[in-house]
Amino acid sequence: MRTHQNIPRPLVRSNQWVIVISVIAFMITQQSVLLLVPLLSGFSSLFLNVHPIMEVTKRFLRKPMSEYVQEDKQQQRFNQILAVSMLSMAFVSSILGWTWLSLLFSVMVLTACSLAIMGFCIGCTIHYHISLWKQHRIENS
């Protein structure tokens, strides 16, 4: 059985919007619990292959999933790793009372998600350059 290698853009966008809203709410209130929604959803996606935010969003799609613009699943997984890493660091920093560090990581993930919503994917750019670097290493070895 073939696994689905793409994710419809509306599902990706819903995840990005939840991250943006959660991070802004966290930055305003300094309540670290607000980071848990995107953080736990991201962990679930990475370790259980179930993304609760996307599962809820699927119920609202009006067309078959294949009719939406598709995002590459592998690329989105890489982006999810980056987001979960930054959200984790923001959450832990906040719990430890390191406000400046939690805000730094919050701003990083907020910026990345906001730009992705507008059409520029920082994670995709990083992934591309890592791939080029790996290829260059293989060719030179």
Image (spheres, helix red, strand yellow):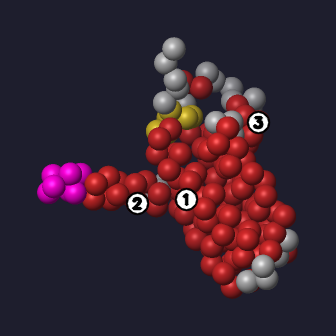
Tag 3: Cα neighbours inside 10 Å, few (<14), some, or many (≥20)? few
* Alpha carbon separation for disc pair 1 and 3: 22 Å
- Tell whether 108 sits left or right of 31: left
The answer to whether residue 14 is seen in the rendering is no
Residue 140 within the segment the image draws in magenta? yes
Q: Identify the image quadrant of residue 114.
A: bottom right
* Alpha carbon separation for disc pair 3 and 2: 29 Å
Q: Which of marks 1 and 3 is nearer the N terminus?
A: 3
Q: Do the residues labelled 1 and 2 touch (CB within 8 Å)?
A: yes
Residue 96 within the segment the image draws in magenta? no
- The residue drawn where x is 85% and y is 71% is 31
Instruction: Name the secondary structure under disc 1.
Output: helix
Q: Write down the residue under mark 3.
A: 56
Chain part drawn in magenta? 135-141
Q: Which mark is residue 24?
A: none
What kind of residue is marked 2? Ile
Q: Check the image and report above or below for 53 versus 36.
A: above
Q: Nearer the viewer, residue 44 or 117?
A: 44
Tag 2: Cα neighbours inside 10 Å, few (<14), some, or many (≥20)? few
The residue furthest left is: 140
* Alpha carbon separation for disc pair 1 and 2: 10 Å
The residue furthest top is: 1
